[in-house]
Amino acid sequence: MFKKTLLCTALVAVSGGAMAKATGTADEIVHGTEAAVGVISLASAAASYDLGASYTQGDTVTLTWSQALAAGVGHTALSISDGTLTIPLTVLSSTGSSVTYRVGAVPAGYDYALTQVLATDAKALLGTGQASGTIVTQTLTAATSTGIVIDAGTLPVEVAEFWDQYAVAVTLKANARIDVEASRKLFSVDAVAMNGSAITTHATDEDEINIAVTTATTYSAAIGAPPLGVAGLTAVLSGGDTNTFTINGDYSWLDSAAAGFAIDTNVGGLSATTGGGDIANSAGVSSVAAGAVMQSDASATPSAKLFIKTAGSTGLSAQAYTADVVINYNNGAKRSKTFSGLAAGSWSLNGQTITAYGIPNQASVTPFLWVQNAGTISGEITGTASCDGVTTDLGALGTAAGDTNTRIGPAVQAVMDGVATCTLGSRYDVTITVNAKKTDITINAGYRVQAADGSNDRLALETSDSLVD
């Protein structure tokens, strides 16, 4: 009877320990990736576990890190505590990313009814050029002396994070519409909505691009995040070292007849302030060329602005702008980081946009779409089509020359024939944009239906222009 009672008690204890799990927490260390460059030993946090199982002599506890530990990292004895008494844990073995402990003798009077806490040591991690978003964890696993798993299901504890400390934001993008009614020499007062802002009144003679180096939001969010993210290695923008901002675009229209690239002030200008003087060529500080404008800033909060001015004396072209930024920082050594190909806005042409509604997509139907330009300024024709909830870019559909009618129906249908989501029997709407004077452009829309007996019928279609009261 005595032996049976002991056996049952032991089985219950093992069963409960196997089903329980530990809960771990740590004030994880948040490192900036820039600061970690070239560093071979990086701090991680100590962890604390509230254990679920009742540990006895001979049990084993293994701590495993998801990243290798720094060379030479040693391990010392730990202990499990009920708040008053402790059970010793001595090092049994270790690898480059783990350590296993053997549980020692349980002291008399140790109270398993109280919360049992295992506090681990902070360990140095091996620096290996971690990518932004890397999370380093410590995982606890344990087993009895007979190999039965206890505290199963214990979740990994985050002990270190790596996030990009710096980001570059184009806080204001080029967003001008070139005014075709001003012979494409000035901007329309209507701007293109960008950066989530509403369309605002735009200057007719100047567009602006703003760029700034900021602290990355993911880095800021990680510090102070629950349970607590503690700042680890941080970089600083090197005082006196130049951070460069290069805005790429087509500035050739500003070139004077002089040798090399030189801004013709009778055509326009490139300045760092609105209405300011032109940016000069100064080695390592600033430069202007037909394809790029470079500025620099050595301050602790680097930024740059570019104001592109037109004097209204030459034609402007639609184009896109990009930015390349090089920041110089210090993490114990001077280093640099490059941000390339950042979208910095674009210029587009204003003009007329008209939608033709309900074109049948059938083999027996031939669409009629004619662009009529009553003016003298020609304009590129582009469009999109919407069918069964899918919008398709039709691309370039030709040019509407002045005082002409341009047929685009076959070009539109050729694209739609290849759109698998626009099934036969569906109808599609076509939105046509013509970069010419708005009041000069109209669109005539309709289609021809060929019956089985060879007869034809022609029907007109409504457009957004014809539906306007």
Image (cartoon, rainbow, N blue to C red):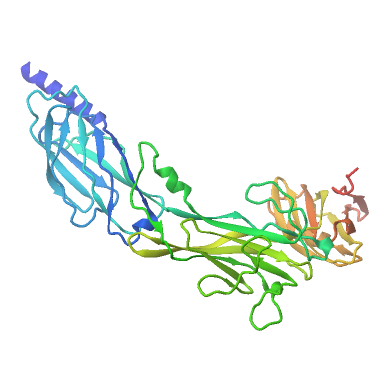
Q: Position of residue 382 (x, y in %)?
A: 76, 60
Quadrant containing the N terminus is top left
Residue 280 vertical position relative to residue 108 in the rendered view, above or below:
below
| Residue in view at x 68 percent, y 53 percent | 420
Q: Position of residue 246 (x, y in %)?
A: 56, 66
* Furthest residue toward top: 1
Q: For residue 120, which quarter of the picture?
A: top left
Judged left or right of residue 311, residue 89 is: left
Quadrant containing the C terminus is top right
**Foreground of the two, 173 or 349:** 173
| Residue in view at x 87 percent, y 64 percent | 406
**Foreground of the two, 299 or 413:** 299
**Foreground of the two, 70 or 363:** 70
| Residue in view at x 59 percent, y 69 percent | 293
Camera sees residue 128: yes
Q: Position of residue 122 (x, y in %)?
A: 23, 45
Judged left or right of residue 1, residue 68 is: right
Judged left or right of residue 347, residue 220 is: left
Q: For residue 384, which quarter of the picture?
A: bottom right
Judged left or right of residue 340, residue 3 is: left
Camera sees residue 361: no
Q: Position of residue 167 (x, y in %)?
A: 48, 54
